[in-house]
Image (cartoon, rainbow, N blue to C red):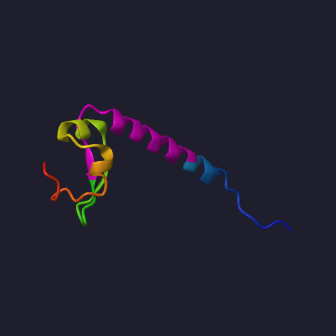
Amino acid sequence: MWVGEDVTEKRAKDREIKLLEERFTKAFQASPVAIGLVTVKDHRVIDVNESLCKLLGYTREELMTQNVFKLAI
């Protein structure tokens, strides 16, 4: 007796999601438009692209996890 489930479809969906995430990340980072992702709850920066760093004069590390209202922008 064999007990289990076919995970072929799940793995295919997981691969598709990973590819979409990679495409989004590449587009986000390569965009000439300054973009920052911020949490709604506490306004923490969770990701920024290089265009935003150049515009604001901060490094990515300096911006990460900061509260946008506490930054001198």
Q: Position of residue 41 (x, y in %)?
A: 25, 66
Q: Position of residue 11 (x, y in %)?
A: 62, 50
Name the residue: 24% across, 62% down. 40
Q: Quadrant of residue 68?
A: bottom left
17 or 28: nearer the eye?
A: 28
25 or 44: nearer the eye?
A: 44
Residue lying at the far right of the rendered structure: 1
Question: Is 11 positioned to the left or the right of 46 in the image?
Answer: right
Name the residue: 17% across, 54% down. 71
Give the main secondary structure of the magenta stretch: helix
Residue lying at the far left of the rendered structure: 73
Name the residue: 70% across, 57% down. 6
Question: Is 22 positioned to the left or the right of 34 in the image?
Answer: right
The quadrant in which the N terminus is found is: bottom right
Name the residue: 26% across, 47% down. 36
Q: Position of residue 4 (x, y in %)?
A: 74, 64
Report if residue 67 lies within the magenta region: no
Q: Quadrant of residue 70?
A: bottom left
Q: How many marks?
A: 0
Specify start and end residues of the magenta stretch as a single range: 15-37
Up-down relation of residue 19 to residue 72 (above or below) = above
Q: Position of residue 52 (x, y in %)?
A: 23, 40
Report if residue 22 lies within the magenta region: yes
56 or 40: nearer the eye?
A: 56
